[in-house]
Amino acid sequence: MTKEEIIAKAYKVFNTFNHPLHFVDTQNSLECKDYEQMLQSCELHEIGPEQVGHAGWSPLPYLLPEALGYLMPRLIEMALNNMHNSDGEPFVLDFIRHLLLAPENQYYGFTGEQSSLTLAALNTIKLEMIEIVEFEGYKKDLLKLIDQFS
């Protein structure tokens, strides 16, 4: 599958996740309340580098499982299209970091098809973006994720 086909399919297979009532648990912190307000104010296609932030400021680690499922097509799209986060770094690194560090229960709601598509995205990153991933020191993490989703 090409990256364009993976992105298109991601929007189809993850459409089982509706716009979540809540993206994050707002009882964690004031920062989480800001994340919630920001994400609720955007449609899926409007979410981009400014909304996902960077390693030091990001709602991604606080996403509830249904929010991750809802956002996955957009996250896959941003990673495969080599978009850059708000610090100007490749978003693919944030994508890898979040998937690696996310509690496994965030994936329990994924169907086999959704997990397979996530794997296809990760394999595409390995094939087409390995130089970036390797240069930034994320190759082992990427390979671990590929193994995890296999």
Image (cartoon, grey):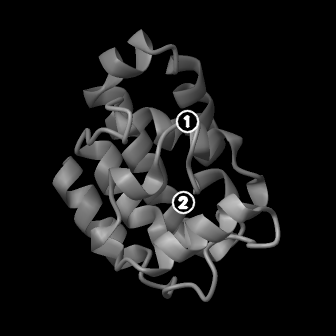
| Residue labelled with disc 1 | 55
Measured Cα–Cα span from mark 2 to mark 1:
24 Å
Task: Note whether residue 107 is visible.
Answer: no
- Say which element carries label 2: helix
Which element is circle 1 on? loop
Q: Residue 147: horizontal and vertical position, in percent?
A: 61, 36
Which label number is shown at residue 115? Answer: 2
Residue at the (76%, 52%) spot, across then down: 103
The x, y position of residue 134, in whole percent, is: 42, 14
Q: Amino acid at mark 2?
A: Ser
Q: Is residue 121 above or below residue 28?
A: above
Would residue 67 be found to the left or right of residue 90 on screen?
right
Q: Nearer the viewer, residue 2 or 81?
A: 81
What residue do we see at 59% from left, 46% from top? 99
| Residue furthest out toward the right | 27
Pick whichever, 129 or 89, lies toward us. Answer: 89
Assess disc 2: are there few (<14), some (14-19) or many (≥20) residues with their C-alpha within 10 Å of its C-alpha. Answer: some
Q: Residue at x 36, y 63 (%)?
A: 74
Of the numbered discs 2 and 1, the one sitting upstream in the chain is 1
Residue type highlighted by circle 1:
Ala
Q: Is residue 149 left or right of residue 130?
A: right
Q: Nearer the viewer, residue 76 or 112?
A: 76
